[in-house]
Each structure stands twice: as C-alpha cells, then as structure tokens.
Image (cartoon, rainbow, N blue to C red):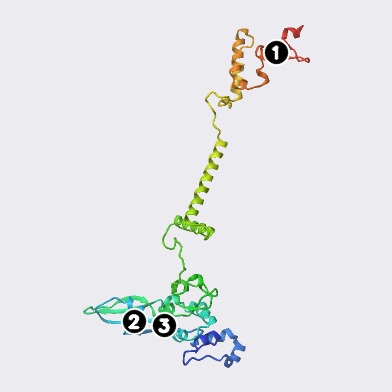
Amino acid sequence: MYFHSHNLELYLSGVNDIHYIDLDIYKDATKEFGIETVRMFLLMLGVKLYPKIESFMRWDKSYLSERLKSQILITNIYDYRFEDYALQGFNEFKKHKIHKETSHYLWNVVLPALKFGNYEHMAMIYRRKYARSYDTVYYDSTFKDSLQYSKWILDKNGNVLSSNEIALEDLDSEYDRNNGLIQFLGIEKREKSILELGGTEEQQEQLDLGKRVKQLAGDDLTEEEIIQALSYAKAQKKAKKHIYEETENPTISDNGSDEKDYSDIDRKPRERKNSHNSTNLGDESNDSSDIKKYNEDDDFDLDTPFNREELRKTELSDMFINNNHHYISKQDSHK
C-alpha cells in the first residue's frame, strides 16, 4: 500500500498488485486532526511513500549477473548462502520507456530517502569442506549492480544510458550532483585531471599551460612553430631585462676616460667640515696646506664657482665681498 503520486505510479506501472490509499476516506479525521497527523498515522500502519529495498537470501548463485559471479573466486566451498538486496520494481521500470521526470524522481527523491549507501554490498556466508565455522565475504549487491549497469539515466541530449556509459560532463543538469549517487554509481569525468590520477600540482600546471597554448595556437601553428615563437619571446624578454639592469646599475669607468669617480661623493658633510676646521687660519704657514686640503676635497673637484683661481689664493678668514664686489682685507676695512 502506497501514498499516491504521479511519479511513483509511473515508476511502479509495470509491477502487479500495487495499491494506493484513498485519503478521501479519512476526510473527517483530516478535518479534526490535520493532514500531517493522518499521514503519520498511516505511515505507522505501514503505508509507504516510496518503493522499498527488498532484502532476500539465496542458496544458489545462478540468479546473479555474470559480473557479480566473476567476483566470487573462493573455491572448495561446501556450503554457502547470499544475503542480498534489490530495489522493488526496478527490473520492470528499466524494461519500459524511461520518462525524464521519473528518472529524476528516482535519483533525486527515492534513492536518497531509502539511504542507498546502506545497501551497497551483499554478504556471502560460506563454509569450506571439513571446516567447523562459517566465514563471510562481501561483494557488490544486486541493488548496486542493477543501478550501475541498467539504462535509466539521461544525458543532456535526452539519451538514456547506464552509469558506466555516461560521463559526468554529460549528465542531465536536473540530477542532484551532491547526494552521493555520482560516487556510488562510479560516474566519472570524461577526462581526469593529473591530480585526480595521482600527479603533482606542478604537472597539472604544465598540462593546463600546454592546453592553453594549444588552444590559442589552434590549427594554424605547428608544434615546431609554437616552440620557435616561445623561444623568440624568451629571448626578447631576456634582452629587455639586460637593458633594464644596465640602466639601473651603470658601470663607473676606471680606465682614465673623461668619466669621473664619484665613489666618495657620499662622504658625510660633518667629516668634510672637520677636515676644513682642522686648519689654523691664523697661521700663514698653513696657507698652502689649507688650499691643498680644499683641493683634495672631492666636492671642490667639481666645476663650481668656488674652484676659481683668485679664491684659492685668498685666505678664507681674510676674505669678504663689499657692495662693489671687490675683495679687501680685514685691515683695509678698519681704515
């Protein structure tokens, strides 16, 4: 007994002896207690919303698909049985025309509600000849095998395929991609990334770069022409870098050319001041040494007004400029 829905009826259309409850019978109860209370009461009585997953036992492996039989490699078995699962109505469903809305209903609503992950494996319980106890091994269940290899999933073009035939990129957009069925059914991308195949990030970056280069080149450039273009671009970039470095860090010539050596240009002003003040300005015997000291100062090697001949012959302490711009001594000024 089931609650009726259009999609459920389509799904179970090939199954005999299916009944749907008539909620009109419970009109009075619905008015008094509300529809949700009535539905909860009926669920407790065993009325179902979805097709059920049936569990069963088999003592013979003949019912299994060839794929499942190939999993069983145990020999010398004296006694065994299978505890397996199957989705009610699925064999009938896959034999009829698959409607898009029904396929979405099964994927998005029914299977998640049934917690499909709990029925992934069947158990084979067996005992070898002369053994006193039973052992258990697990294989893919009939439930999973049927969902994987039956044609009931639609691609973007409306083609009905099995999960091992369809690529993730082609899966119809209305299927929920986050409910775990993609992983459960083993639906994979058409082209896996290097990382997914166990490669490194560097290998993935190289592959992506190669794809972008190929995409930009299209069919107009050969592989050799692409390599030549990249080599030329590399050489151009290297040349520009060299020119930039030469501009930022010019070489100071030391071969006696007209270029001057400014290596001491950053001497501190205080050092130069101390050098000048160390001269005894009252001692005329130091005139030549004073002039020499000034001349040895790098700042006075430059072409400046302070390097004029008449200034070098005049002692700084006895020199000032009058209003007529003539040089006179201190004694003349007292007169």
Image-quadrant location for residue 91: bottom left
Q: CA distance from mark 3 to mark 1?
A: 117 Å
In whole angstroms, how far apart are the C-alphas of marks 3 and 2? Answer: 13 Å
Q: Residue visible at 60% across and 91% down?
A: 27
Q: Secondary structure at mark 3?
A: strand
Identify the amino acid type marked 3. Answer: Ala
At x 51% / y 48%, what residue is drawn? 232
Query: Which residue matches tag 2?
Result: 82
- Report the label total: 3
Q: Earlier in the sequence, mark 2 or mark 1?
A: 2
- Mark 3 and mark 2 in contact? Answer it, CB < 8 Å: no
Of labels 3 and 1, earlier in sequence is 3
Amino acid beneath label 2:
Phe
Residue denoted by label 1 = 319
Question: Percent x, y for residue 268?
Answer: 59, 25
For the residue labelled by badge 1, is the local secondary structure a helix, a strand or a loop?
loop
Residue furthest to the right: 323
Residue 289 location (% of width, % of height): 59, 12
Residue kind at label 1, given as amino acid type: Met
Outermost left residue: 130
For label 3, count other residues whose C-alpha is less than 10 Å away and answer few (under 14), some (14-19) or many (20+): many
Q: Residue at x 58, y 91 (%)?
A: 26
Which residue matches tag 3? 86
- Above-or-below relation of 210 to 290: below
- Under circle 2, the secondary element is strand
